[in-house]
């Protein structure tokens, strides 16, 4: 099944020139179900998306469709994700396709759909995703979710990612109109987070990042490099790109990462460890276990 929910180093790192300079390992946690939407936390854990399972280990269905939810795993020292368990999220949330934990770990921002409880007034597409922010309550989990104020129900918003200082939120959207209008099917935007958890106006990251194709799954590394996926002409369907952040907060021209980080199939959702020598990505490349798989990669010394 093709997943419908779709980020290494600075140019000076010469290990990114030859395919033989990397090793990629398909993780043991992969199976026939999709695993995608990678995001690290400050506490050496990783969040990812997959199907919600019931007590019998079967995929939960709503209206005949599988339910997506967020899982949390611990990063081991040898490139594995262990101790995987579902994240406790308010049962009133219908499905969650991606999530990010704030740097201070006080808030969780998720991508989800509207429900009867927060259904917008007027016309809107029920398939449009939006972003909600919740807080953690002991014994309950993540709850009290509220729609982020800049989300317009006429458009779709997804794939949240924080800057390292927690003062900027990056996301994917198809916002139309004005200076922030989307160039292609979806673009990457940013919004400033101000005092008292208020937000500025979303800004399109511009043509150095976005194209007339679809840009998805942004991630900002510890060295302020932006990684994302795009289906502009490349190796395969979606390829992984990087943009180095300038001193003024803008980004240099996007560069496509080489093989084998990219393949002839869909590759996306790259995150990189603080040592800049290893990380994880998602791929549907040949030789996987049946759907979007998580791979651990290492730059050879």
Image (cartoon, rainbow, N blue to C red):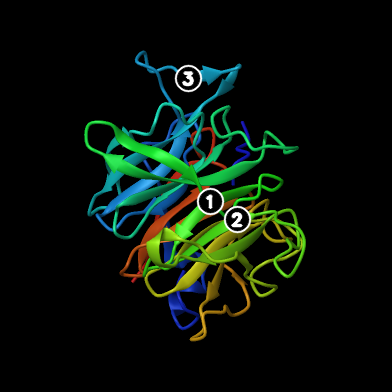
Q: Please say if the residues under marks 2 and 1 sit with CB atoms less than 8 Å apart.
A: yes
Looking at the image, residue 218 lies above or below residue 192:
above
Residue drawn at x 34%, y 63% is 273
Looking at the image, residue 174 lies above or below residue 288:
below
Where residue 95 appears, as percent x and y from the top left, is 51, 32
Between discs 3 and 2, the one toward the N terminus:
3
Between discs 2 and 1, the one toward the N terminus:
1
Where residue 265 appears, as percent x and y from the top left, is 63, 48
Question: Which of labels 3 and 2 is toward the front?
Answer: 2
Q: Which residue is mark 1?
A: 159
Residue 139 falls left or right of residue 1: left
Q: Please say if the residues under marks 3 and 2 sit with CB atoms less than 8 Å apart.
A: no
- The residue nearer to you, when weighing 289 against 142, is 142
Residue drawn at x 48%, y 41% is 293
Q: Which residue is mark 2?
A: 172
Between discs 3 and 1, the one toward the N terminus:
3
Looking at the image, residue 195 lies above or below residue 45:
below
- From the image, which quarter does the C terminus lie in? bottom left
Q: CA distance from mark 2 to mark 1?
A: 6 Å
- From the image, which quarter does the N terminus lie in? top right
Q: Secondary structure at mark 2?
A: strand
Disc 1 packing (10 Å; few <14; some 14–19; many ≥20)? many
Residue 125 falls left or right of residue 150: right
Residue 131 falls left or right of residue 210: left
In the picture, residue 242 is in which quadrant?
A: bottom right
Q: Which residue is mark 3?
A: 60
Looking at the image, residue 54 lies above or below residue 201:
above
Q: Secondary structure at mark 1?
A: strand
Q: CA distance from mark 3 to mark 2?
A: 27 Å
Residue drawn at x 48%, y 86% is 247
């Amino acid at each position: 099944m093709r997943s419908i929910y779709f980020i290494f180093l600075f140019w000076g790192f010469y290990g990114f020139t030859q395919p033989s300079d990397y090793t990629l390992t398909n993780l043991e946690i992969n199976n026939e179900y999709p695993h995608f939407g990678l995001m690290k936390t400050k506490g050496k854990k990783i969040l990812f998306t997959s199907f919600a399972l019931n007590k019998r280990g079967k995929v939960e269905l709503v209206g005949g469709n599988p339910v997506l939810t967020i899982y949390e795993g611990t990063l081991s020292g040898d490139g594995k994700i262990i101790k995987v368990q579902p994240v406790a999220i308010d049962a009133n949330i219908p499905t969650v396709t991606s999530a990010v934990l704030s740097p201070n770990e006080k808030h969780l921002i998720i991508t989800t759909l509207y429900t009867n409880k927060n259904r917008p007034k007027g016309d809107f597409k029920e398939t449009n995703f939006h972003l909600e922010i919740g807080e953690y309550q002991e014994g309950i989990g993540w709850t009290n979710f509220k729609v982020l104020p800049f989300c317009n129900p006429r458009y779709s918003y997804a794939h949240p990612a924080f800057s390292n200082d927690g003062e900027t939120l990056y996301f994917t959207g198809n916002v139309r109109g004005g200076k922030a209008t989307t160039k292609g099917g979806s673009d990457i935007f940013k919004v400033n987070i101000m005092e008292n958890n208020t937000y500025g106006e979303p800004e399109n990251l511009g043509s150095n990042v976005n194209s007339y194709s679809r840009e998805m799954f942004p991630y900002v590394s510890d060295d302020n490099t932006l990684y994302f996926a795009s289906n502009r002409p490349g190796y395969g369907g979606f390829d992984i790109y990087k943009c180095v952040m300038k001193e003024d907060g803008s980004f240099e021209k996007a560069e496509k990462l080489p093989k084998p980080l990219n393949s002839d199939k869909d590759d996306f959702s790259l995150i990189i460890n603080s040592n800049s020598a290893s990380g994880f990505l998602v791929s549907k490349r040949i030789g996987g276990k049946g759907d979007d798989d998580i791979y651990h990669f290492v730059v050879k010394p």
